[in-house]
């Protein structure tokens, strides 16, 4: 990659009304209305997992979008903790007090349901692409127990990527993550098209791998606000952290011979069962 990548920040909104907590996930996100008349599922920088979860959400969400995978819009959300004063749950009030300023929102899809591959048709090509993508970013949180996919107006959407990119919780050991095998056994889409051989992860790799360029990665990482990257031990500034994410994911792409066979084997085992 030559030159610089233009920073394309996420759209920014200001929360106007706290609607309700969403208790399905461990981070207790909240449903909020914003000044653009939109409604968003908001995740907080003050939650127990910290801002790194929000960084993973943005990097993987925007990278998936750039690869053509369906992801609801992500926005940054300005939050005044006073919006939650009427919420009777003390845990919610404490979470909002710990999260003033910039947080992360995902477009709320009203009426969306958790995706059930047995009830909603998923194209085999998409299943293979999602499986390959999850193996790339190390997503351990898209199982049949917790699909983290929604069905909305007949279309699937990928959500909740906070459990990906686990290397950034300990950068000193990030090198080992590059070749780490991916356990696809319980992936929610591994059984799609099983009668026809299951998800073709090699075809997905051939299609998406070349599009996973340094420029595409830099564009996704550029969407992360500086304040969530500042002060990272071992790095001089947010630009250095961004460069490390790009290098790490490029190395993971190039090490596919180490982790893709395990995914292929998991698909074959499901077909044979």
Image (spheres, helix red, strand yellow):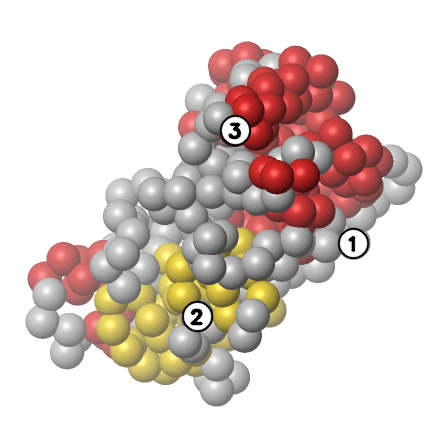
Placement of 168 over or under 191, stated as above or below:
above
The quadrant in which residue 242 appears is top right
Q: Position of residue 267 (x, y in %)?
A: 58, 28
| Residue that badge 3 annotates | 270
On-image quarter of the N terminus: top right
Q: Residue at x 58, y 66 (%)?
A: 155
Helix, strand or loop for disc 3: helix
> Which dot marks residue 34?
none
Local crowd size for mark 3, using a 10 Å CA cut-off: few (<14), some (14–19), many (≥20): some
Q: Disc 2 vs disc 1: which is toward the camera?
A: 2
Q: Earlier in the sequence, mark 2 or mark 3?
A: 2
Q: Nearer the viewer, residue 259 or 145?
A: 145
Q: Nearer the viewer, residue 202 or 32?
A: 202
> What numbered label is drawn on residue 6?
1
Out of 238 and 202, give the one closest to the viewer.
Answer: 202
- Could you classify mark 1 by the number of other residues whose Cα lies within 10 Å: few (under 14), some (14-19), or many (20 or more)? few
- Horizontal and vertical percent for residue 90? 9, 62
- Whether residue 158 sits left or right of residue 97 in the image: it is right
Q: Which residue is mark 2?
A: 112
Disc 2 and disc 1 in contact, CB within 8 angstroms: no
Residue at the location (54% across, 37% down)? 190
Q: Is there a contact, CB below 8 Å, between mark 2 and mark 3?
A: no
Q: Residues within 10 Å of mark 2 (few under 14, many from 20)?
A: some
Residue 163 place in picture, x, y as percent: 43, 38
Res 143 → quadrant: top left
Image quadrant in which you'd find residue 7 = bottom right
Placement of 59 over or under 209, stated as above or below: below
Label 1: element kind? loop
User: Can residue 148 be seen in this snapshot?
Assistant: yes
Which one is earlier in the sequence, the residue at label 2 or at label 1? 1
């Amino acid at each position: 990659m030559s030159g610089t990548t233009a920073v394309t920040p996420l759209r920014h909104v200001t929360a106007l009304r706290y609607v309700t907590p969403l208790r399905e996930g461990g981070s207790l996100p909240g449903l909020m209305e914003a000044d653009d008349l939109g409604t968003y599922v908001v995740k907080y920088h003050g939650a127990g997992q910290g801002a790194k979860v929000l960084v993973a959400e943005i990097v993987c969400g925007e990278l998936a979008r750039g690869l053509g995978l369906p992801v609801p819009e992500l926005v940054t959300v300005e939050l005044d903790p006073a919006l939650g004063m009427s919420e009777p749950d003390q845990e919610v009030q404490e979470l909002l007090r710990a999260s003033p300023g910039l947080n992360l929102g995902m477009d709320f899809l009203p009426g969306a349901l958790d995706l059930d591959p047995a009830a909603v048709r998923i194209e085999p090509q998409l299943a293979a692409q999602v499986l390959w993508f999850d193996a790339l970013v190390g997503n351990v949180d898209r199982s049949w127990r917790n699909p983290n996919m929604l069905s909305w107006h007949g279309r699937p959407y990928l959500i909740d990527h906070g459990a990906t990119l686990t290397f950034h919780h300990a950068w000193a050991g990030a090198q080992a993550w590059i070749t780490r095998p991916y356990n696809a056994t319980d992936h929610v889409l591994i059984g799609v098209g099983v009668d026809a051989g299951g998800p073709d992860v090699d075809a997905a790799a051939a299609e998406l791998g070349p599009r996973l360029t340094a420029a595409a990665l830099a564009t996704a990482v550029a969407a992360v606000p500086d304040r969530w990257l500042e002060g990272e031990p071992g790095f001089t500034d947010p630009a250095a952290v961004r460069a490390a994410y790009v290098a790490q994911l490029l190395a993971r792409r190039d090490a596919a011979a180490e982790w893709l066979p395990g995914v292929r084997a998991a698909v074959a085992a499901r077909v044979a069962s």
